[in-house]
Image (tube, rainbow, N blue to C red):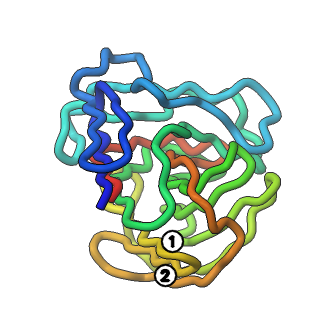
Protein backbone atom coordinates (compact mmCIF):
# COMPACT_ATOMS: atom_id res chain seq x y z
CA UNK A 1 0.00 0.00 0.00
CA UNK A 2 1.32 3.46 -0.90
CA UNK A 3 1.56 5.96 1.93
CA UNK A 4 2.05 9.70 1.58
CA UNK A 5 2.45 11.75 4.74
CA UNK A 6 2.48 15.53 4.47
CA UNK A 7 3.55 17.36 7.60
CA UNK A 8 5.77 20.08 6.05
CA UNK A 9 9.22 20.24 4.21
CA UNK A 10 10.81 18.09 1.50
CA UNK A 11 8.99 15.95 -1.01
CA UNK A 12 9.89 12.81 -2.88
CA UNK A 13 7.70 10.75 -5.20
CA UNK A 14 8.03 7.03 -5.88
CA UNK A 15 5.83 4.17 -6.98
CA UNK A 16 5.51 2.49 -3.56
CA UNK A 17 6.44 2.82 0.09
CA UNK A 18 6.04 5.77 2.46
CA UNK A 19 6.17 9.36 1.23
CA UNK A 20 6.66 12.33 3.52
CA UNK A 21 6.41 16.08 3.24
CA UNK A 22 7.58 17.60 6.51
CA UNK A 23 6.26 21.12 7.06
CA UNK A 24 8.65 21.56 9.97
CA UNK A 25 11.47 22.01 7.46
CA UNK A 26 9.57 24.60 5.36
CA UNK A 27 10.49 28.24 5.99
CA UNK A 28 7.53 30.33 7.22
CA UNK A 29 5.90 32.18 4.34
CA UNK A 30 6.80 29.52 1.76
CA UNK A 31 4.86 26.71 0.11
CA UNK A 32 5.90 23.07 0.44
CA UNK A 33 7.78 21.88 -2.67
CA UNK A 34 5.43 20.64 -5.37
CA UNK A 35 2.37 22.49 -4.05
CA UNK A 36 0.55 24.97 -6.29
CA UNK A 37 -1.95 27.75 -5.65
CA UNK A 38 -4.98 27.72 -7.94
CA UNK A 39 -8.71 28.45 -7.98
CA UNK A 40 -11.93 27.26 -9.55
CA UNK A 41 -14.00 30.08 -11.09
CA UNK A 42 -11.66 32.92 -10.03
CA UNK A 43 -12.88 36.50 -10.43
CA UNK A 44 -9.76 38.23 -9.04
CA UNK A 45 -6.20 37.50 -7.93
CA UNK A 46 -5.46 34.09 -6.46
CA UNK A 47 -5.45 33.77 -2.68
CA UNK A 48 -2.15 33.52 -0.80
CA UNK A 49 -1.25 30.28 0.99
CA UNK A 50 1.81 29.72 3.16
CA UNK A 51 3.41 27.61 5.84
CA UNK A 52 2.97 29.49 9.11
CA UNK A 53 3.95 28.87 12.76
CA UNK A 54 0.97 27.84 14.87
CA UNK A 55 1.39 26.96 18.53
CA UNK A 56 -2.25 25.90 18.70
CA UNK A 57 -2.05 23.40 15.85
CA UNK A 58 -3.08 19.80 16.29
CA UNK A 59 0.30 18.05 16.46
CA UNK A 60 2.86 20.27 14.73
CA UNK A 61 4.28 23.74 15.26
CA UNK A 62 3.63 24.74 11.62
CA UNK A 63 0.56 24.46 9.43
CA UNK A 64 -0.35 25.27 5.84
CA UNK A 65 -2.86 28.14 5.82
CA UNK A 66 -4.77 30.35 3.44
CA UNK A 67 -3.38 33.66 4.66
CA UNK A 68 -4.82 36.34 2.34
CA UNK A 69 -7.92 36.50 0.16
CA UNK A 70 -8.32 38.83 -2.82
CA UNK A 71 -11.36 37.16 -4.39
CA UNK A 72 -14.25 36.80 -1.98
CA UNK A 73 -16.87 36.07 -4.64
CA UNK A 74 -19.36 33.38 -3.67
CA UNK A 75 -18.53 31.09 -6.57
CA UNK A 76 -14.75 30.89 -6.20
CA UNK A 77 -13.08 27.78 -4.75
CA UNK A 78 -9.55 28.44 -3.47
CA UNK A 79 -7.11 25.56 -3.90
CA UNK A 80 -3.64 24.62 -2.76
CA UNK A 81 -2.87 21.29 -4.39
CA UNK A 82 -0.15 18.92 -5.51
CA UNK A 83 -0.60 17.19 -8.88
CA UNK A 84 2.52 15.09 -8.22
CA UNK A 85 0.92 13.24 -5.29
CA UNK A 86 -1.26 10.93 -7.37
CA UNK A 87 -4.20 9.24 -5.62
CA UNK A 88 -6.94 6.92 -6.85
CA UNK A 89 -8.00 4.40 -4.18
CA UNK A 90 -7.27 4.51 -0.46
CA UNK A 91 -7.55 6.85 2.50
CA UNK A 92 -6.80 10.55 2.89
CA UNK A 93 -6.89 12.19 6.32
CA UNK A 94 -6.13 15.75 7.44
CA UNK A 95 -6.66 18.06 10.40
CA UNK A 96 -8.53 21.26 9.57
CA UNK A 97 -9.34 24.49 11.40
CA UNK A 98 -11.72 27.19 10.18
CA UNK A 99 -10.09 30.52 11.05
CA UNK A 100 -12.49 33.12 9.62
CA UNK A 101 -15.03 33.97 6.94
CA UNK A 102 -18.39 35.73 6.73
CA UNK A 103 -19.67 34.31 3.41
CA UNK A 104 -18.19 30.86 3.98
CA UNK A 105 -15.97 29.05 6.48
CA UNK A 106 -14.01 25.86 6.82
CA UNK A 107 -12.98 23.68 3.92
CA UNK A 108 -11.49 20.30 3.25
CA UNK A 109 -9.82 17.97 0.78
CA UNK A 110 -9.75 17.52 -2.97
CA UNK A 111 -8.59 14.29 -4.64
CA UNK A 112 -8.50 12.54 -8.02
CA UNK A 113 -7.94 16.10 -9.24
CA UNK A 114 -7.33 16.40 -12.98
CA UNK A 115 -6.92 20.18 -12.86
CA UNK A 116 -8.37 23.13 -10.87
CA UNK A 117 -11.79 22.59 -12.47
CA UNK A 118 -12.22 18.81 -12.11
CA UNK A 119 -11.97 16.91 -8.80
CA UNK A 120 -13.79 15.43 -5.81
CA UNK A 121 -14.14 17.48 -2.63
CA UNK A 122 -15.14 16.77 0.98
CA UNK A 123 -15.63 19.76 3.24
CA UNK A 124 -17.03 20.90 6.59
CA UNK A 125 -18.57 24.39 7.07
CA UNK A 126 -19.05 25.72 10.63
CA UNK A 127 -21.43 28.46 9.45
CA UNK A 128 -23.80 25.88 7.96
CA UNK A 129 -22.90 23.15 10.50
CA UNK A 130 -22.76 20.57 7.73
CA UNK A 131 -20.37 18.07 6.19
CA UNK A 132 -20.66 17.36 2.45
CA UNK A 133 -19.22 15.41 -0.46
CA UNK A 134 -19.18 16.92 -3.95
CA UNK A 135 -17.64 16.55 -7.33
CA UNK A 136 -16.58 19.56 -9.37
CA UNK A 137 -16.69 18.99 -13.13
CA UNK A 138 -15.75 21.74 -15.57
CA UNK A 139 -15.96 24.20 -12.68
CA UNK A 140 -19.51 23.24 -11.66
CA UNK A 141 -20.12 21.67 -8.26
CA UNK A 142 -22.65 18.90 -7.62
CA UNK A 143 -23.42 17.52 -4.16
CA UNK A 144 -23.18 13.77 -3.56
CA UNK A 145 -23.94 13.50 0.16
CA UNK A 146 -24.79 15.77 3.10
CA UNK A 147 -24.88 15.57 6.92
CA UNK A 148 -26.18 18.54 8.90
CA UNK A 149 -26.72 19.44 12.53
CA UNK A 150 -23.04 19.19 13.47
CA UNK A 151 -21.35 21.21 16.19
CA UNK A 152 -17.69 21.93 15.31
CA UNK A 153 -17.08 25.64 15.82
CA UNK A 154 -14.83 28.20 14.17
CA UNK A 155 -11.32 27.94 15.64
CA UNK A 156 -11.63 24.25 16.59
CA UNK A 157 -9.43 21.62 14.99
CA UNK A 158 -11.23 18.65 13.47
CA UNK A 159 -10.13 15.55 11.56
CA UNK A 160 -11.58 15.00 8.10
CA UNK A 161 -11.07 11.64 6.37
CA UNK A 162 -12.04 10.32 2.95
CA UNK A 163 -12.06 6.66 1.94
CA UNK A 164 -12.42 6.13 -1.82
CA UNK A 165 -12.27 2.78 -3.62
CA UNK A 166 -13.55 2.43 -7.17
CA UNK A 167 -16.82 4.35 -7.27
CA UNK A 168 -17.52 4.12 -3.50
CA UNK A 169 -16.78 7.14 -1.30
CA UNK A 170 -16.99 7.54 2.48
CA UNK A 171 -16.68 10.78 4.43
CA UNK A 172 -15.50 10.68 8.05
CA UNK A 173 -15.42 13.51 10.61
CA UNK A 174 -13.61 13.22 13.95
CA UNK A 175 -13.50 9.44 13.68
CA UNK A 176 -17.12 8.86 12.69
CA UNK A 177 -18.37 7.83 9.25
CA UNK A 178 -21.10 10.34 8.36
CA UNK A 179 -21.31 10.21 4.56
CA UNK A 180 -21.50 7.59 1.81
CA UNK A 181 -21.84 8.04 -1.94
CA UNK A 182 -21.45 6.13 -5.19
CA UNK A 183 -20.16 8.11 -8.16
CA UNK A 184 -18.33 7.41 -11.43
CA UNK A 185 -17.47 10.96 -12.53
CA UNK A 186 -13.71 10.53 -11.99
CA UNK A 187 -12.56 6.91 -12.01
CA UNK A 188 -8.88 7.59 -12.67
CA UNK A 189 -6.07 8.79 -10.43
CA UNK A 190 -5.37 12.47 -9.86
CA UNK A 191 -3.76 14.97 -7.57
CA UNK A 192 -4.72 15.90 -4.02
CA UNK A 193 -5.01 19.17 -2.15
CA UNK A 194 -6.86 21.58 0.10
CA UNK A 195 -10.06 23.51 -0.67
CA UNK A 196 -11.90 26.53 0.68
CA UNK A 197 -14.73 28.65 -0.71
CA UNK A 198 -15.21 32.41 -1.11
CA UNK A 199 -13.74 34.29 1.91
CA UNK A 200 -13.05 31.23 4.08
CA UNK A 201 -9.56 31.34 5.61
CA UNK A 202 -8.51 27.92 6.88
CA UNK A 203 -5.48 26.01 8.24
CA UNK A 204 -4.47 22.44 7.44
CA UNK A 205 -2.00 20.02 9.04
CA UNK A 206 -1.02 16.40 9.57
CA UNK A 207 -2.11 15.20 6.14
CA UNK A 208 -1.80 11.45 5.57
CA UNK A 209 -2.53 9.63 2.32
CA UNK A 210 -2.54 5.83 2.15
* Image coords of residue 118 (percent x, y): 71, 53
Seen from the viewer's position, the closer of residues 101 and 38 is 38
Circle number at residue 179: 2
Q: Position of residue 1 (x, y in %)?
A: 29, 61
Task: Please tell me the numbered disc located at residue 149.
Answer: none
Does residue 68 lie above or below 18 as drawn?
above
Q: Position of residue 137 (x, y in %)?
A: 77, 59
CA–CA distance in space, label 1 to label 2? 8 Å
Would you say the residues marked 1 and 2 are in contact, meaning their CB atoms lie under 8 Å apart?
Answer: yes
Q: Which residue is mark 1?
A: 131
Q: In the displayed structure, would residue 166 be above or below residue 208?
A: below
Residue 45 horizontal side relative to residue 169, left or right: right
The residue that appears at 23% across and 21% down in the rendered structure is 25
Look at 57% across and 83% down and name the residue there: 181
Residue 174 locus on image (x, y percent): 30, 70
* Disc 1, SS: strand
Q: Secondary structure at mark 2?
A: strand
Q: Which of the two residues, 167 or 138, is positioned nearer the viewer here?
A: 167
Q: Which class describes the residues within 10 Å of circle 1: few (<14), some (14-19), or many (20+)?
A: many
Q: Is residue 92 left or right of residue 191?
A: left
The answer to which image quadrant residue 167 occupies is: bottom right
Out of 151 and 5, give the one closest to the viewer. 5
Residue 160's place in the image compared with 27, above or below, is below
Q: Give the residue drawn at x 25%, y 49%.
A: 17
* Residue drawn where x is 49% and y is 30% of the image: 35
Please state if 146 lies on the left or on the right of 65 as rendered: right
Task: Check the image and name the residue furthest to the front.
Answer: 15
Which circle, 1 or 2, is nearer the viewer?
Answer: 2
Of mark 1 and mark 2, the one earlier in the sequence is 1
Quadrant location of the C terminus in the rendered image? bottom left
Amino acid sequence: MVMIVLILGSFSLASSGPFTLALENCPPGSLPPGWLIAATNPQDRLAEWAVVPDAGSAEASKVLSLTKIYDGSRGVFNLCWNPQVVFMDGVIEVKVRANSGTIDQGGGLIWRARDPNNYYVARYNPLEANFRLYFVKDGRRQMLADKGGLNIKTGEWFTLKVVHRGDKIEGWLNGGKLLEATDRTFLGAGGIGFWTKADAATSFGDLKVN
